[in-house]
Amino acid sequence: MRTSRLEAFSDGVLAIILTVMVLGLDIPPEHDLRSFIHATGHDLIVYLLSFLYISIYWIGHHHMFRLVNRISRGVLWANLALLFALSLLPFTTEWMADSELARTPLFIYGLNLTLSAATYFVLQTLVIRQDGAESALKRAIGRNVKGKISPVLYLAGMLISVFVDPDGRVGAWLALVCYGAVAIMWIVPDRRIDRFIRETEGLEESARPAER
């Protein structure tokens, strides 16, 4: 199977996820800023956070499959598992917003983020395994420091949401900060991967016979 079909399917699913998620935002009853803030409240904040996560996964997915030449059955199933985890984000996002950052929805949201990261890691691992020791993706991601830090922050956010200030709001906002910190960390572009992709494409171009 060509990677273009998998990418097109994944792009369509992610677009639907974003569309469903934005439909969860409430329309202000009045046409003024105060009504807008009152109607959206936490909804807009958590929507923006989830939008960032979907965008980050889309960019990472795009980069990953620019370095893949073939797709095994295991990669197909791992990709579906990733899409399943991400498809839960509209539900966990809206629940967290409607509850006004209650402990249980915050914990479940962190669990959803953890599941998404785990399925992406499995997909990445299978891609590297199928390409062998000379995997271009393995060389591009290197030590994957961000990937190792992310689960720690997810776990910290989940634990904080449950145990820190259970009767107040401090724990909820600290948990949200942990989740947001991961998103901000991944927004910063990884120039190493972009550079590796350009170098790989440059080598492929130079390896082609010159046109007469």
Image (cartoon, grey):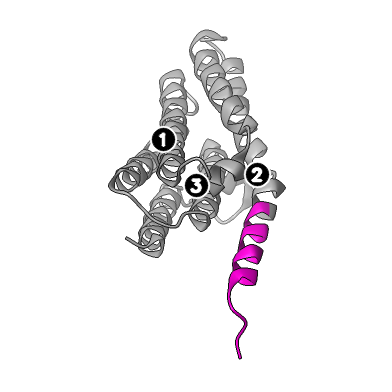
The residue that mark 2 highlights is: 187
**Disc number lying in front (3 or 1):** 1
Q: Identify the residue shown where x is 32% and y is 46%.
A: 80
The residue that mark 3 highlights is: 54
Q: Position of residue 162 (x, y in %)?
A: 48, 12
Task: Tell me which corner region of the image, top left, top right, bottom left or bottom right, holds residue 173.
Answer: top right
Measure how far apart labels 2 and 3 are at the Cα level: 11 Å
The residue that mark 1 highlights is: 122
Disc 1 marks which amino acid? Val
Q: For numbered disc 3, what is the local secondary structure?
A: helix
Q: Can residue 186 be seen in this view?
A: yes
Question: Which residues make up the magenta segment?
Answer: 196-212
Disc 2 marks which amino acid? Ile
Mark 2 or mark 3: which comes first in sequence?
Answer: 3
Q: Identify the residue shown where x is 61% and y is 91%.
A: 212
Mark 1 or mark 2: which comes first in sequence?
Answer: 1
Q: For numbered disc 1, what is the local secondary structure?
A: helix
